[in-house]
Amino acid sequence: MATVTHTAPPPLVTRRKVGWARARRYVLPLVGLAVALAFLGPYIVMVLNSLRPSSDVVQTPPTFLPRTWQWSTFSQVLGDQRFLNWLKTSLLVATSSTIIVVLAAIPAAYFTARFRFPGRIAFLFLVLITQMFAPTSLVVGLYREFFELNLVNTYLALILTNSAFNLAFAIWILHGFFSSIPKEVEESAHLDGCGRFGTLIRIMLPLSLPGVVTAVIFTFIAAWNEYVVALTLMLDDAKKPLTVGITSYVTGYEQHWDQLFAASIIAIIPVVILFAFIEKHLVGGLTAGSIK
Amino acid sequence: MARKMTALIAGAGAAALVLSACSGGSGSGTAGGGSSSGAAKVTSIKLVAAEYSKDHTAAFWKQFADKYKAKTGITLDVQVVSWDSIDQQSSTMIQNNNAPDLLNLNVYASYAKDKLLYSADEVLAPAIKADVLDAFVKSGTYQGKMYGMPDLSSARALFYNKDLFTKAGIANPPKTWDEFEADAKKIQALGSGNIGYAMPLGPEESQGEFSIWTFNNGGDWKTAGKWSINSPKNVDTLTFLKKLSVTDKVTQNNPGKTNRAQAFDLFKSGKAGMVVGFSPLAGALDADKKVNYAVAPMPTKEAGGTPQTFGVTDYLMSFKKPGNQAAVKAFYDLYYQKDQVNQFIKAEGFLPVTKSGLEIFASDPKLKVYLATLPNIHLTPTDDPTWDKVKLAVQQNIGAGVSANGDPQAVLTALQKAAENGG
Amino acid sequence: MPVPATAPRRRRRSRGGDTPIGVALLWLGPALLLILGVVVFPAYELVKAAFSRYSITGLRLGDAGTTNFKNVLDHPDLITVLTNTVIWVVVVVALTVLVSLALAQFLAKDFFGRKVVRWAIIVPWAASLVITAKLFTLIYDYYYGTLNMILQTLHITSGPIDFLGDDRWTMPSMIMVGIFVSVPFTAYVFVAGLNAIPGDVYEAAKIDGARPWQTYWRITLPLLRPALVVASVLNIIYVFNSFPIIYTLNDRNPGYLHDTTITFMYKLAFKSAEKDVGMSAAAGIFNVILILIVIAIYLRTLKWQEQED
C-alpha cells in the first residue's frame, strides 16, 4: 500500500505519519524476521537433526546444536538409488497431476462462471461435496476400482487420483477470479472477434493469473505430499513417492532419524524451486493502478 | 467443430469404459481373487512382507525373489510395507478379494478361522515342519492344523546399565521382584534425571511388556484353554507395575503413554537403569558404543523361580488361491533353507525359528542368554482368533491401569469380559 | 478501465443464455470425468461397505443393514470424539483465517526482506504433513524435546511439560500444529485475493479521508470475500479430514480421548478392539454428513448464494 501524504495537514498527524514512515523501515523487517523464524523454526530443528547421528536426535537431555556433527547424511541419502526412485516418482506424479488439474479446471471454472446451463449449481456443489470425502475412507474403493482397471501399481492411477482430489480447490478459486472480472472486458474481446475459447486464453487467463498460479502451487504441493492413496496403490518400492518411501527410514526396530530428515529436506527443495519460478505472478500486480 | 465432437465422443466413451469396468463383482466368502476356475498353474505370486528395517528387508526379499525365479520359473512380486500400515494394506486387499499369495503378519488365526489359508499339510514339507521349534509349531496351530509358519522370532530379556548399577552400589542384576524394586529405587535416587526402570505400556506393544512380567509371576492370558486375564496373579502383576510407576516413582514419565522406542531411547541415552529389551536393541547399543550394558534373565516374583522368557514370532501365512499351491509350497521350501531363513534372521538381528537355526546361532555369545530359553519360550495365545481382537483391546486399555487413578482390577476385568464375548 | 466489483452485476441478457447441456459437457467433461471416476465411485464403495458385515481380516461376510451405523452411534467414545472434532475444527480454522488475514496484509507491504519472509512461509506448506507431524512429536517430547529445552533454558517453565501425554496439553499442542500447517496456503489465497483488488480503490478511500481500519473493514474485507469463502470452506474440509497430525501426535496415547472423527474412523478399522471395517465405513459416512452440515450452515450464514446470482 502506498503512503499518500495529504496537503496542508494538521501538524500532529504529519509528525505521526513521518515518524511511522521512518520507524517503518526498521519495524517491518524485524516483524518479518520474527514471522520467518516462527515458520522456519521447526524446520531449523529438522536441519540440525539431519546433521547429527540418529542416536543424538533422541538423546536425553537434548542439545540444540548437535553434540557431534555428521555431514555425510545428505550425500548418503542422495546416493541411495531407492531414494532417487522415490524422488523421480514424486516429480512425475506431482507435475502430471498439476498439468491435468490446470487443463481441466480452467475450462470448467470459466464455463460455470460465465454461462447459465442446467445443472450448473449442481456441478459446483458436486465438486465441493467430493472434497468432503476423506482420502482415508476412499482408499479401499479406489483400490478396487484401479484393480478392476488393472491400474494398480501404475503412475497413471496415482496421477488421476491426485488430479481429481485437487480439482475442487482449483475450480473454486478460478471460479472466484473469473466471476470478478467485469463482463465488459469480455464483451470488448468478443467485439474484436475472439471466440469463447480465445477469450479464455487471451483475456481471462492473464487477468486471473494469481488464481491460476495459486491453483498450480496448491495442486503441486498436495500431490507432492499425498500419502494414503500412494501407500495403497503403489506396490513396487521404485514406484513409491517420497512420502511413502521415506517412512522406511524409521521403523519400530531401526531408526535413522538423520536420514529421514535429510530426505525430507531434499523433498522440500523442488517445491521451493517451483515457488521461486512462479512467485512473482502470485503476488505481482495485474490491473493498473496498484502500487505495492 | 469436428475437434469438439471428437472430444465429446472420446469423453463419453471413456466414461462408459470406466463405468462398465467398475461393475466387477461384489464378492463375499472367498478372498481368492483371480479369474480362473480351473487348476491352471500361476506364473507369478505375490508376497506382502513387513518392513523390519530399511537396509535389510527389501534387500533380502529381492535376492530371495531372484533365487525363487531361478528355481521355479515363477515370478515373486514382493511388496514391502511398513509395520504401521501393513494392517491397513492387508485389510484393503482382502476387502477387495485380492489377498496376496503370502502375507507376513504378526497374527494369523483370524485368517485361518475365515478359511482363507493353506495349512502346513498342504504346503509345508514334513521335514521342515519337524525342524521348526515346537513352541512355534504350537503357536502357529489353530484347531489342530498349522497355518502360521514363523519367519523369525525374538525374545525379551532384562537389559541393565552397568555403570548406573555400579554408581548405585548394585552388584548383581535383580533376581526377584523385591530386589528389582529396591534396585530401581536406588538408581532413581541417583538423581540428575536418572530413571530406575523404563516401562513402555503405550499402545504399540503393551501386551508384550505386560506378558513378560506376568509370566514371571505365574500369570498368563489363558489358563487351561480359558481366558484368565483378570486372574489374581495378573492383577497382582499390574498392581506391582502401577506401584513402580505411581508409588515408588521409579519409572519414566507416563508409562501408559510410552512406546518401546521411547523407552529404548532413554536406555540408549544412558538415563534408564533397566529396560526390557530384545536383540535389535542390543544391536543398536553395540553400534552406538555409548552405554555399558549387560543382559540378564527377567526377575521372578519369588526367589528360586525359573525365569520365563517371553517371545514373539511373526508369521508367513499363505492364502488359498486357484493354482498357487505348488508355487506356495516352493516358496516355503526355499525360505526354510538354512541359508535363507537364517540369513534373514541374522540380517535383521532376530532369533531363529528352527532347530537347525538354533545350532547355527549358538556360536554367537551375545545371543546365549536368549537361545538357552528359546525352546521353552512363552508366547501370547496367537493360536486363538479371539486374541487378535483382545490384543488390540489390551493395547488400548492396559496403560490406564498404571496411571495415578488407574484400577488394575477393573482394567483387567473389562478385558476379560471383552475376551469372553469374542473380542 | 475495470470497475471495482462491489455490487452484483445483473444483466438482463446474460452471455450464452440457456446453454445446451452438450456444450456444457464439453467444457466440464474432463473435470467431471475425473471426479466421477476417482471420487464418486469409491464413495459408492464406501456406502456399500457401510452396509456390509466384515470379519476382522477384512473379509466381507454379508449384509449388515444398519447395524454398523447403530454401532457407531452407540459407541461410548463417540461424544468425546465429536467434541474433540468441533473444538479442533472451529479453533484451527478460526485462528488460521485470522492469522492468515493479518499475514497477507503484512506481506502486501513493501519492506526490506519481504521476499525472505514469503519464502519462509512456504516451507511448512511444502513439507509433507506426515513428516511435520513426526518432527513435532520429537519437538514436543517430554525427555528430548526441543520445546521443553527452550522453555526451560529461557526459564519460562521450571520442569518439562508432557505436551503430548498430559491430557490438558494434548489438544492445544495439536491445534498449534494444525494452525502452523494451514496458515501458509490460506495466507497465499488471501494474498492472491488482495492482489486482485485494484489500487484505485484504496486511493479513492484515502481521498475520502478513510482511516486504515475503516478502509480495511469496509473495503478490503468485502472485496476479499470470494477468497475468504474459498479459504474458509476448504479449510473446514481439510482440517476436518486432517489425519496425519492427530494420528501421529496421538501415537502414544491409548484409547480415543483425543481423537477426531477421522482418526476415530481409522482406528475403528485397524487399531481398535473392534477392528471393524464396516463400522469404520459407517463412521466415514457420518463424517461426510457432518462436514456437509457444517458447510451448509456456514455458507447459509454467509449468504453465499447472492454473490453468484
Image (cartoon, rainbow, N blue to C red):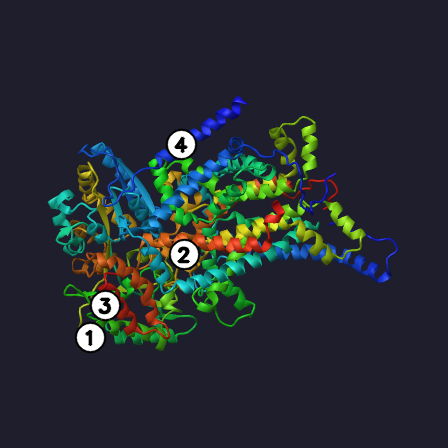
- Residue B229 is marked as 3
Instruction: Using a 10 Å C-alpha cutoff, classify the residue at mark 4 as few (fewer than 14 neighbours), some (14 to 19) or many (20 or more).
Output: few
Q: CA distance from mark 1 to mark 4?
A: 76 Å
Quadrant of image for the N terminus of chain C: top right
Dividing the picture into quadrants, the one containing residue B261 is: bottom left
- Residue B303 is marked as 1
Q: Are marks 1 and 4 on the same chain?
A: yes
Q: Are marks 4 and 2 on the same chain?
A: no
Number of the front mark, 1 or 4 = 4
Task: Please give left or right for residue A249 compared with residue B176 in the image.
Answer: right
Q: Residue at x 46, y 30 (%)?
A: B11
Label 1 resides on the chain identified as: B
Label 3 resides on the chain identified as: B
| Residue A44 visible somewhere in the drawing | no
| Residue C99 visible somewhere in the drawing | yes
Label 2 resides on the chain identified as: C
Amino acid type at mark 3 = Ile
Judge by depth and name the residue closer to the eye, A217 or A134.
Answer: A134
Q: Which residue is mark 2?
A: C263
Helix, strand or loop at mark 4: helix
Instruction: Using a 10 Å C-alpha cutoff, classify the residue at mark 1 as few (fewer than 14 neighbours), some (14 to 19) or many (20 or more).
Output: few
Amino acid type at mark 2 = Thr
Q: CA distance from mark 3 to mark 4?
A: 56 Å
Residue A167: % across, % down: 51, 41
- Residue C50 is marked as none
Amino acid type at mark 1 = Ala
Dividing the picture into quadrants, the one containing residue B12 is: top left
Judge by depth and name the residue closer to the eye, B294 or A96.
Answer: A96
Number of the front mark, 1 or 2 = 2
Q: CA distance from mark 2 to mark 3?
A: 28 Å
- Residue B16 is marked as 4
Residue B49: % across, % down: 29, 45
